[in-house]
Amino acid sequence: MPAVPCSRPSLPPVCENQDMKTPIAYYGGKQQLAGKIVRILAQAPAQKIYCEPFFGGGAVFFARGGAEHEVINDTNRIYLNILAKNPRSEALGYTANTAAMLHEWGHWLDQNMTRDGKTLREQMPDLGRLLEEDAVLYTRHLIKPEEVIKTGSDLAALPRDMRGKIEDNLNEDRDLKNGVSDIFSGLTKNAIGGRWGHKWDYWEKPGSLEKEAVAHFFEARAAGGRKLEILKAYFPSAYGYFENTLKGF
């Protein structure tokens, strides 16, 4: 996970800040030691750049004062994502990057809601087919092409102007359609997509489409409102299949 530059209210260079606490607390964190660590940092020369390579839950970062530039790093993508600005979270009215956090938790749930050694997505063998069928039906309704469309490959092979119409549609309320855009990208190997999507080589990995779809479904389910309505409008059968699978837990 790359380091994340971030910003927060201006504070003295190094001080023990009693007002700002980490939003993420967990066993093994530095919450109890944060004050002591900050007092040690205060003995060092003033810093223009503050780097924290082992961010964790951010107890020290939030307890200390501000620096002109601050960079945090951690292998846990959920913790870093919640602090980064992101338009798909802003579209939902969140100030933190809650949408990305929900998406990453979706991946975690997928990996941990196991049964007979299978991840959640592996318990839905028809998910890929249903995603493809839903995308095809929505496309037929949207552009009414003369070409016969049955698969994601057929979508990818549409003329450029027709693919452009689909992308124009995906870019309406684009930050609420991040999941829809990403799934279309996966189905067509990036021949069709809106603002949001993975690189083409990611989709070459077996199961990547189903993996991302499950995370997007969890993200939309948790966010609710317009975001969930949009996703269900594009992928009604696939999302219904997802919900029915969850009933087994």
Image: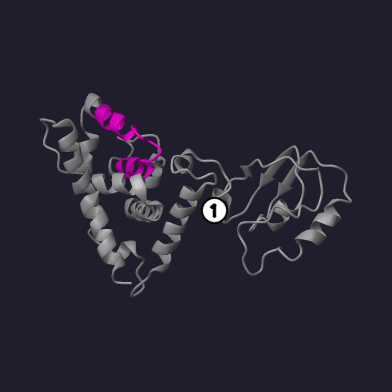
Residue 177 highlighted magenta (yes or no): yes
- Residue 58 located left or right of residue 122: right
Q: Amino acid at mark 1?
A: Arg
Q: Name the spot of residue 228 as percent of width and height, x first.
A: 33, 49
Nearer-the-camera pick, 239 or 230: 230
Q: Give the residues drawn in magenta, as a range.
A: 163-186
Q: Is residue 122 above or below residue 197?
A: below
Circle 1 sits in a helix, a strand or a loop, which is it? helix
Q: Name the spot of residue 190 as percent of width and height, x first.
A: 33, 37
At x 34% / y 40%, what residue is drawn? 181
At x 58% / y 47%, what residue is drawn? 83
- Residue 73 located left or right of residue 94: right
At x 26% / y 32%, what residue is drawn? 166
Q: Specify the farthest residue to the bottom.
A: 116
Nearer-the-camera pick, 168 or 73: 168
Count the marks: 1
Q: Name the spot of residue 193 as percent of width and height, x first.
A: 33, 36
Q: Residues within 10 Å of mark 1 (few under 14, many from 20)?
A: some
- Residue 147: quadrant of the picture: top left
Residue 193 visible within the image: yes
Q: Name the spot of residue 15 as percent of width and height, x first.
A: 82, 50
- Quadrant of the image for the C terminus? bottom left
Residue 204 visible within the image: no
Q: Specify the farthest residue to the top.
A: 161
Residue 4 highlighted magenta (yes or no): no
Q: How is the image coloured?
A: one colour
Q: Which residue is mark 1?
A: 77
At x 57% / y 56%, what residue is drawn? 76
Q: Main secondary structure of the magenta part?
A: helix
